[in-house]
Image: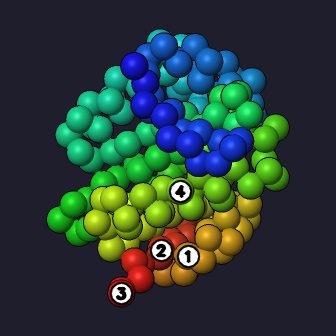
Amino acid sequence: MLFKHMVDSEIQLVFLHESLAEDIFKLVDSDRTYLSKWLPWVNSTKSSDDTKHFIKDSISKYANGTMMTCVIEYQQNIVGLIGYNLIDQSLQKVEIGYWLSSRYQGNGIITRSCNFLIDNAFQNMQMDTVQISVAKNNRPSRKVCERLGLVLEGIISNSGKVNNQIHDHAIYSIKKKKT
């Protein structure tokens, strides 16, 4: 059985499972041009078998306590992925990563989903810091970070490479409020 977390009446996060591989692959494949602008793995994802491999790897990392990835369902449609790309218990820090189909942007889906994961990290995982790293020129993702109240910690040069283009990354964070 898959576990699901209700974010609100429109959004739920569903833990990755191999049975979702075909639907996830179809979503990536249908939005390949847009997604490949920011995400290095898109061009190497050529079949649902590639997606199954990613899912198996993600489940293994979840079992090790270092990562958690979920499908985003919006109005019962799979629209993207979100999760903790890194869970570091020793530093009490998580790093959130996500992608969303271009067709569903502008509905607050990522903002609401990130807010849910931030609250979860602070309330249930006893984390002190949540970070999000985005390509410096990815204005929509940077605006998400700003709406969430994350603080720009800095710009890291040459942080990623997508389609032979090197990107700088903006690092945002939010700290748990001390009571």
Residue 75 occupies quadrant: top right
From what the image shows, is residue 6 above or below residue 151?
A: above
- In this view, the residue in front, 1 or 35, is 1
SS type, badge 3: loop
Q: Earlier in the sequence, mark 2 or mark 3?
A: 2
Residue denoted by label 1:
150
Is residue 32 at all visible to an observer of this figure?
A: no
**Is residue 30 left or right of 43 when viewed as pictured?**
right
Whole-number angstrom distance, CA of label 1 to CA of label 4: 14 Å
The residue type indicated by label 4 comes to: Phe
Q: Are marks 1 and 4 in contact (CB under 8 Å)?
A: no
Residue denoted by label 3:
179
Callout in the foreground (3, 4):
3
Q: Earlier in the sequence, mark 1 or mark 4?
A: 4
Residue at the location (47% across, 63% down)? 119
Residue denoted by label 4:
116
- In this view, the residue in front, 171 or 1, is 1
Q: Identify the disc placed on residue 173.
A: 2
Q: Earlier in the sequence, mark 3 or mark 1?
A: 1
SS type, badge 2: strand
Whole-number angstrom distance, CA of label 1 to CA of label 2: 5 Å
SS type, badge 1: loop
Residue at the location (37% across, 72% down)? 129
> Which residue sits furthest bottom?
179
